[in-house]
């Protein structure tokens, strides 16, 4: 049956719109992406308390039962990082940012290609999982050489990333065909944000693709006699910094476009939203050296330039903080809120989806502030490679991203399936427990980091236990250990809600839970000719991508060229 659907945006005469059959298929695909993502997160999250206990001074890795499954702290940490930070995010985002623009534009994607991409990504994941689980790729989620994992791991990871680029290509293709059919029209804002994010990711991924395909795969297959660790790290961080915005911006899409409506308000300004995403597109990538301040053989001049560009890329997040707060205030005042800060009480705190996302935002105030500390060359030596860094990223990717995606699932699953959210009060509780656990973990870890406790270290079984004990870390260690338990409870609550919802019978028409697209206080309008200067200047996303690429070449060329000229062949090491 192929009936036309009520569309998000006006249908365009020259393009086939979404019919019921395609929409059902697209919803199924989105559900597959989301469920695969949350399954990966489930395994990753169950390993989390083990890591937290380590930083609480408790070594659980010697328990015989655990030893059967996980050979070492480092294997546990590798699985935790890969599954949560790389697999969960990429799968969720690929489904989310294909579904949203297709709905927003009302354009029919090629569903065979879309399923092919999902299957390719899953094949990549399963391939990489084998050596990870067999302790043959215990190289942590950054896989820095000369640590050498099985080639199967690098090949699986490369296939996974390549699949994400196929999704990027499909979404950009949908947008371009919409543009051709709608000359002179302003790109609808949800599509604008999605396409900007995918284009940013395409520029960002180049570094990783060159590193893995050009260096790590041939080396791990024994085709080259060594690998250059400095060049590999530099290419890794070319991708490694912007990857954090690839995780963040899909959450921002929800904060800008959906959360205001869910809370009872409006998006602040479409123009400002576009400016933020245009800035992310241009400035996300040329900043990777802020992960390499401690690396030798990189000129300080370039480190300083990357530092200033890092401060620049914090600006669109500050714009987002302003916009998000303004739209929440708009919502709360519409619900009768009063006072300079008293309005906060009138947000719909009983709504699990809203609460999860607002708490994600609150944690990101601290996560973002910590990021600026990390980026400052004067402070970096104090925090680099200490427990501070995992503290930082658990209140960025661990909450701003993850807790937002959890909150999104509370409406997305009913919207995709027609099933009702199981036990909304448990869902609400899971958001608070997750937020509380992450804040405790972050406090404990930032604190330990300031005292000099290293990151990625099995401190609970340190050979220099006396040195560790003499740091007087009893309180932060306790906080960190407790946070592992709190997060475990949060996970049990969340997965109870998710799994029971998924297993429940379909009761409603899925479309009776609509996509909560918000109106804007200051909209962009439909026609470019009548739009504001800001909207017109930010519309040409391909030109902005080109500018991004030029900027990246300018600030990476002089860093990478001497490394290529002085390539070092360092043999691999297996330290586990
Ligand atoms: Fe970071 C290391 C700098 C953001 C993730 N970062 C990491 C690592 C990860 C990570 C995973 O410069 C570890 C990598 C590794 O394993 O080695 N980070 C920054 C900076 C930002 C930043 C400047 N990071 C993120 C985000 C992440 C993430 C986002 C994941 C999603 N980070 C660094 C640096 C390092 C680093 C160095 C290397 C450290 C080292 O030494 O190795 C900025 O983008 C942050 C800007 C953000 C803000 C906050 C805006 C606040 C908002 C919320 C508003 C709230 C409201 C709520 C409105 C300025 C938008 C209102 C509430 C009511 C109730 C009304
Ligand atoms: Cu970074």
Image (tube, helix red, strand yellow):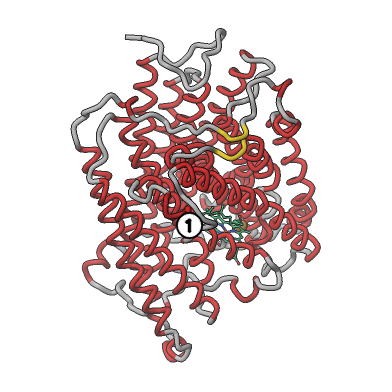
In this view, 328 is above or below 378: above
Q: Nearer the viewer, residue 276 or 543?
A: 276
Side of 83 relative to 219 (left or right): left
Q: Is residue 215 visible?
A: no
* Residue 179 image position (x, y, % from top left): 63, 19
Q: Residue at x 79, y 47 (%)?
A: 554
Side of 227 relative to 67 (left or right): right
Image quadrant in which the N terminus is located: top left
Could you tell me how many numbered marks the image carries? Answer: 1
* Residue 80 image position (x, y, % from top left): 39, 58
In this view, 68 is above or below 223: below
Q: Residue at x 68, y 40 (%)?
A: 275
Ligand 2 quadrant? Answer: bottom right
Residue for badge 1: 342
Q: Residue at x 67, y 69 (%)?
A: 294
Q: Residue at x 77, y 41 (%)?
A: 550
Q: Quadrant of residue 537?
A: top right
Mark 1, Cα crowd under 10 Å, few <14 / some 14-19 / many 20+, is few
Q: Is residue 486 visible?
A: yes
* Residue 175 image position (x, y, % from top left): 59, 24
Within 8 Å: ligand 1 and the Cβ of disc 1? no
Q: Secondary structure at mark 1?
A: helix
In this view, 230 is above or below 16: below
Q: Nearer the viewer, residue 364 or 246?
A: 364
* Residue 559 image position (x, y, % from top left): 76, 56
Image quadrant in which the C terminus is located: bottom left
Q: Residue furthest left?
A: 505
Q: Quadrant of residue 24?
A: top left
Q: Nearer the viewer, residue 512 or 372?
A: 512
């Amino acid at each position: 049956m192929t009936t036309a659907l009520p569309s998000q945006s006006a249908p365009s005469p020259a393009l086939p719109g979404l019919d019921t059959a395609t929409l059902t298929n697209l919803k199924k695909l989105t559900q597959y992406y989301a469920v695969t993502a949350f399954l990966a997160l489930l395994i990753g999250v169950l390993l989390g308390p083990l890591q937290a206990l380590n930083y609480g001074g408790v070594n659980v890795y010697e328990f015989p039962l655990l030893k059967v499954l996980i050979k070492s702290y480092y294997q546990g940490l590798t699985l935790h990082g890969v599954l949560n930070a790389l697999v969960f995010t990429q799968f969720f985002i690929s489904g989310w940012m294909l579904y949203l623009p297709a709905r927003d534009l009302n354009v029919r994607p090629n569903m065979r290609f879309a399923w092919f991409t999902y299957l390719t990504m899953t094949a990549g994941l399963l391939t990489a999982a084998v050596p990870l689980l067999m302790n043959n790729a215990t190289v942590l989620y950054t896989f820095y050489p000369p640590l050498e994992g099985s080639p199967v791991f690098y090949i699986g990871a490369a296939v996974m990333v390549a699949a994400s680029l196929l999704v990027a290509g499909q979404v950009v293709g949908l947008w371009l065909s919409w543009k051709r059919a709608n000359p002179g029209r302003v790109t609808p804002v949800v599509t604008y944000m999605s396409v900007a994010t995918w284009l940013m990711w395409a520029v960002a991924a180049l570094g990783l693709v060159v590193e893995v395909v050009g260096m790590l795969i041939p080396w791990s297959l024994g085709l080259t006699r060594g690998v250059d660790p400095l060049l590999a790290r530099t290419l890794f961080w070319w991708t490694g910094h912007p990857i954090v915005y690839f995780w963040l911006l899909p959450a921002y899409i929800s904060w800008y476009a959906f959360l205001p409506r869910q809370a009872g308000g409006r998006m602040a300004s479409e123009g400002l939203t576009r400016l933020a995403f245009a800035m992310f597109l241009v400035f996300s990538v040329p900043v990777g050296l802020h992960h390499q301040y401690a690396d030798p053989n990189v000129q300080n001049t370039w480190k300083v330039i990357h530092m200033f560009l890092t401060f620049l890329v914090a600006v669109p997040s500050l714009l987002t903080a302003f916009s998000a707060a303004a739209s929440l205030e708009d919502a709360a005042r519409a619900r009768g809120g009063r006072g300079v800060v008293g309005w906060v009480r009138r947000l719909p705190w009983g709504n699990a989806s809203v609460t999860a996302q607002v708490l994600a935002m609150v944690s990101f105030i601290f996560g973002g502030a910590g990021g600026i500390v990390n980026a400052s060359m004067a402070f970096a030596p104090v925090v680099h490679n200490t427990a501070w860094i995992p503290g930082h990223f658990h209140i960025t990717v661990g909450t701003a991203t993850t807790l937002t995606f959890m909150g999104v699932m509370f409406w997305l699953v009913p919207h995709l399936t027609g099933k009702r959210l199981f036990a909304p009060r448990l869902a609400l509780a899971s958001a608070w427990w997750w937020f509380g656990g992450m804040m405790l973990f972050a406090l404990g870890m930032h604190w330990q980091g300031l005292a000099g406790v290293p990151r990625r270290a099995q401190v609970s079984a340190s050979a220099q236990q006396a040195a560790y004990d003499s740091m007087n870390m009893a309180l932060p260690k306790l906080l960190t250990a407790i946070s592992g338990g709190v997060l475990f409870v949060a996970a049990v609550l969340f997965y109870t809600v998710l799994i029971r919802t998924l297993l429940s019978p379909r009761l409603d028409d899925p479309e009776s839970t609509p996509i909560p697209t918000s109106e804007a206080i200051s909209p962009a309008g439909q026609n470019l000719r009548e739009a504001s200067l800001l909207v017109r200047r930010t519309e040409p996303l391909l030109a902005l991508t080109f500018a991004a690429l030029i900027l990246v070449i300018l600030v990476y060329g002089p860093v990478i060229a001497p490394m290529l000229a002085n390539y070092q062949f360092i043999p691999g090491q297996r330290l586990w």
